[in-house]
Image (tube, rainbow, N blue to C red):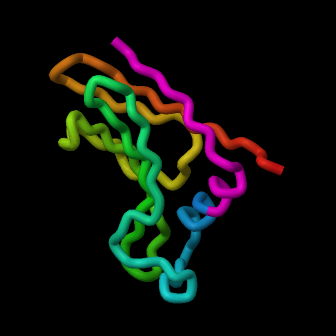
Amino acid sequence: MEKNFTLTIDKETIDEYNSLMLADYLDYEKNSIPRFSTIKSWTINYGDGYEVDLKICSGNDGEPLWCEAVLFINGSEVECTEVYDSIDGDWMLYDRNTNITFRLHVIPIDLM
């Protein structure tokens, strides 16, 4: 079984975070970024207790931001993706206990 969801995010927001994830050096203090934190997240409710968080996270000063998707069932983490440096595109998570694949398609929208 497969459950799909399309998440639209403002193109300006995607571009801003993607540039921070591709930075060679990121000064956290100058950019007011807390270390080892979730900077931004979007939660998608798939129903039946399933949720997927798309998260942008920080590491240590100088390191670029990174992102991942995390699958939860009734609030407990089941699986997470590899770490990526771009939030737009397709994300896929799989619950081995129920054989359900969760696909999240992130697309930019232009709000101007």
- Please report the residue visible at 51 percent of the width from the left and 55 percent of the height from the top: 85
> Image quadrant for the N terminus?
top left
| Furthest residue in direction right, as rendered | 112
Which range of residues does the magenta coloring cover?
Answer: 1-16
Residue 24 in the image: x percent, y percent? 56, 73
Residue beneath the point at 58% across and 43% down? 88
Tell me if residue 97 comes above or below residue 15 in the rendering: above
Q: Position of residue 8 (x, y in %)?
A: 62, 39
Image height of 45 relative to 64, above or below: above
Location of residue 102 with respect to 40 vertically, above or below? above
Query: Which of the two residues, 38 or 60, is positioned nearer the viewer here?
Result: 38
The verdict on residue 14 being magenta is yes
Q: Residue furthest top?
A: 1
Q: Tell me if 104 is positioned left or right of 89 in this view.
A: left
Name of the residue lying farthest toward the bottom: 30
Q: Which quarter of the figure has residue 53?
A: top left
Q: Is residue 47 magenta?
A: no
* Percent position of residue 54, x then y: 43, 47
Residue 51: quadrant of the picture: top left
Question: Count of labels shown?
Answer: 0
Could you say which is closer to the camera, residue 95 or residue 25?
95
Q: Position of residue 82 (x, y in %)?
A: 36, 46
Residue at x 38% of width, y 63% of height: 38
